[in-house]
Amino acid sequence: MSQNEETESRYTEIKSKDILASIAELNSGLTFQEKETKQILGEIYSIVIALDYVEKAYLRDLVSSAQYTNSVNKLLAQYKTYLGNEEVRKAFVDLDHFKRKYDIVASNAITRLERGIPITVEHAIVDAQATGGTIASDNSAQRKGNYNGKDVAEATGNFITVMDALKLNYKAKDQLHPLLAELLLSINKVTQSDFEHRKKLVNWIVKINKMRVEDTLNDNEIRELLFDLDLAYKSFYSLLE
């Protein structure tokens, strides 16, 4: 090892010890729960930054739609899992508070966290490479009314599932958001067409995603969501005829 390399190695070692000492000092006097909460908030910060890089990479066409969708879904799932901890949720407050407190500049990530679904799901963007280059032929088949029966049945079933859930008084964020996201995914498998009232489903997914965990839809909102689901289902069904 040269003298410069040895000096650099010693400097790195000293800096590492300084950093560890600073962390130990910051954590002194904290309970185990408080230390864990701080650590998880740090993980959430890392997720926001990572998500922003993924969003920018996709916008610059550096990753495929499939790679983007998988990465975003994973990061969104981790984000929601961490916020499932009540103590962390109290310290986090909300996304806007967290962003301002830690001076986060990551507009693409913030938008994606607010919407709660990848842009590819929101706009029914499918990766031709991931589907074996069949998108063009699939779209041609759809224009002729030749839809995949299994996919149509799955989407129809998901429409019914969401409407039944609302009638059974499902009204919390953690109850409805996964069902609506799954519905949109199944619709995208059938068609990439932006049919009438599809946008309303996206708007509901975003609205429910912005709710706090303890919030619920009121009776008027449930009736409105049921009405919009019925309209979207009828538009979807008309598309198949």
Image (tube, rainbow, N blue to C red):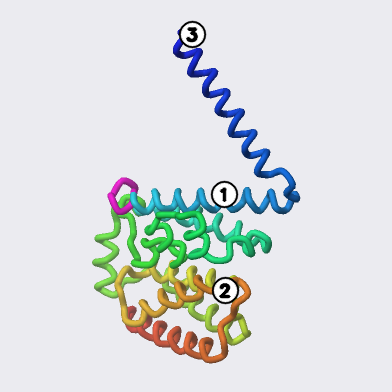
- Does residue 60 appear to the left or right of 232 in the view shown? left
How far, Cα to Cα, is label 2 from label 1?
Answer: 24 Å
Query: Crowding at label 2, few (<14), some or many (≥20) Cα neighbours within 10 Å?
Result: many
Query: Crowding at label 3, few (<14), some or many (≥20) Cα neighbours within 10 Å?
Result: few
Residue 145 within the magenta-colored segment of the rendering: no
Q: Is 234 or 84 nearer to us in this picture?
A: 84
Looking at the image, which residue is at 49% across and 15% down?
A: 7
Q: Position of residue 108 (x, y in %)?
A: 37, 58
Label 1 close to label 3 by CB (< 8 Å):
no
Q: Which residues are magenta?
A: 57-63
Q: Which one is in front in this view, the residue at disc 3 or the one at disc 2?
A: 3
Of callouts 3 and 2, which one flags the residue occurring earlier in the amino acid sequence?
Answer: 3
Of callouts 2 and 1, which one flags the residue occurring earlier in the amino acid sequence?
Answer: 1
Amino acid residing under circle 3: Met
Q: Is 19 or 192 nearer to us in this picture?
A: 19
Q: Which one is in front in this view, the residue at disc 2 or the one at disc 1?
A: 1
Q: Is 112 or 144 nearer to us in this picture?
A: 112
Q: Position of residue 223 (x, y in %)?
A: 51, 90
Of callouts 1 and 3, which one flags the residue occurring earlier in the amino acid sequence?
Answer: 3
Amino acid residing under circle 1: Gly
Q: Secondary structure at mark 3?
A: loop
**Residue position marked by numbered label 2 in the rendering:** 173
- Quarter where residue 24 is shown: top right
Q: Which mark is residue 42?
A: 1
How far, Cα to Cα, is label 1 from label 3?
Answer: 36 Å
Q: Which mark is residue 1?
A: 3
Residue 62 within the magenta-colored segment of the rendering: yes
Name the residue furthest top.
Answer: 2
How far, Cα to Cα, is label 3 from label 2?
Answer: 58 Å
Q: Secondary structure at mark 1?
A: helix
Q: Secondary structure at mark 2?
A: helix
